[in-house]
Image: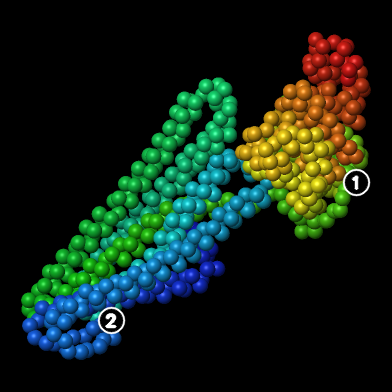
Amino acid sequence: MKERVASMSTFRRLLGYTLPYWRLIAVSLVGAVGVAASDSAIAFSVGKVLKKVFSEDSHEIAISIGPLLSTAFSVDSLSIFRLLPFALIALFLFRGVCRYIQQFCITYAGQLGVQDIRNEIYQRNMRLSLRFFNNHPTGVLMARVLNDVSMMQNGLSEVLMSIFRDTLTALGLLGLVFYLDWKLAIITLVVVPLMIFPTKIIGRHLKRLAKLGLERLSDISCILQETFSGIKVIKAFSLEDREINRFQAANLLFLNFARKTLKYQALHTPIMEVITSFGIAGVIWFGGSHVLSGQMGADAFISFVVAMGMIYSPIKKLLNVYSIIQRSLGAAERVFEIIDETPDIVDGPDALSLGRARGEVAFRDVCFAYNNEQVLSTVNLSAKKGEVVALVGPSGGGKTTLVSLLPRFYDVGSGSITIDGIDIRSLKLADLLQQIALVDQETILFNETIANNIKYGRTDASDEEVERAARAAYAHDFIMEMPDGYKTNIGDRGVRLSGGQKQRLCIARAILKNAPILILDEATSALDTESEQMVQQAINNLMSNRTTFVIAHRLSTILHADTIAVLDKGVVVERGSHQQLLESGGLYKKLYDMQFQGEGTDVRSKM
């Protein structure tokens, strides 16, 4: 019962997305009325027309648009026979126009509704925190936006179309059969309840299989996303066969669910036809008996049989739509799970606006856990305006997590982080992010022009400002060597650029943003010596007059930091200047000696 209520709630919510397009739905309704009226007219007139055509003498014939509206005139059988094809063409032309209007308008309304759903799920995804994306693989999210919404789209279009056209057609023909003979009409409809039971059982299985099938399709999307993104590594290690086997295994799992779905889909129509045959047999038996006994005219019986044959078609379509609805609901539930996801990083009710910050940052007793795993424990750290704070330590020590708390990618578990003495949780998130520029170890560039990638730092920047930022990042020269300069499209993830070029574009983006606080997360870790030197010069320009937090494995890049904090297992175990930490002989000195062993005093003197 609860599942049925939940399904109805999901279905109503799904239909609710079409309500803004009620004008299209209204036009579609007019077309559906025309289709229903045409079908009723064909069924009602066929018996009478055939009777008149095959009579020998001149007769008065009724040309009917329905059982209640007709026009009588005298015409001979030959004239009727000659007019019949033209009347038939005209009727089907009218029916075709109405069907086109009905189908186009209702499916377009459904398409617009699904477009809104796709926009909403993408918008909701963009508003969620990094914790959500860490818990949901990229391929799964892509599948929700593409595959799940596409299944919803197909279902919604079919449902809307059938609700209007087939329901009205069935009602019109139903009224006609009761008008012709109510006893035979009851025999016709006796089998309809028998159709409902197998339809519900099949629909329930299809809904379950749809959700499981979409999960398997999500697995395929994950594999595609991983392999295409990591194709260089796959080829470097000659793992093509391994990935092909992994894809084929996932595809086979999806095929198993698809096979079961097709089995139930294929089973529905034969069951409906067998059940329908009982109604047809009953009508022929009792109706034929009435004709033979003179209780019913042959023309009325012919009209009834035609109407009965036509009425089963929309009824079967309506019952088949139930199965389509169930598959769509399976997809809709997965989509609405994402839409209903509540962001855990939001503005408070009294969030404060902030102009340009001075850049004084303080971490006070900060603790943070990820999925019940303690990552940071009672971290205290501060930076005055324009100071450089370096974070070093073994991998997994919590360095990246610590700086990720500053722009509220995550919220602290306990303690606080302040900018200029104001708790960042009391600031508007948009204002907070305007205070911080990030250059990450992973160079994130988009399949856009160089200029637009730099403008991610500030989308309203002028071309002159973009160029100044590129010059400060030592990127202008190589940009001008590109085919179209700043208008050159750099391809997916900047595939046409070297590592150093990508990093300098990211630095130019941060320079253009001109934020008072800067986060550098191992910005030179993946570069060769020559590229590192040029990128380091760009970073020095970027750090000027900014409060900077630097995460670095290469200790040579942070020797002149105002404060170096050593993190190990989420705890600040040492803090001080480079010289102070060397003299203390702790973990920092151990890391320093390990990194520069064998290079001797010559290297140290250069530092």
* Quadrant assignment for the C terminus: top right
Rendering coords of residue 243 (x, y %): 49, 28
Give the secondary structure at mark 2.
strand
Residue in the image at 45% along x and 35% along y: 250
Mark 1 nearby-residue class (10 Å; few <14, some 14–19, many ≥20): some
* Quadrant assignment for the N terminus: bottom left
- Distance in Å between CA atoms under marks 1 and 2: 82 Å
Q: Is residue 45 left or right of residue 135?
A: left
* Kind of residue at disc 1: Arg
Residue identified by numbered label 1: 358
* Kind of residue at disc 2: Gly
Rendering coords of residue 265 (x, y %): 33, 51
Relative height, residue 372 to residue 151 (above, below): above
Mark 2 nearby-residue class (10 Å; few <14, some 14–19, many ≥20): some
Image quadrant where residue 230 sits: top right
Whether residue 39 can be seen here: no
Mark 1 or mark 2, whichever is nearer to me: 2
Residue in the image at 16% along x and 74% along y: 302
Q: Is residue 135 left or right of residue 575?
A: left
Q: Earlier in the sequence, mark 1 or mark 2?
A: 2
Give the secondary structure at mark 1.
loop
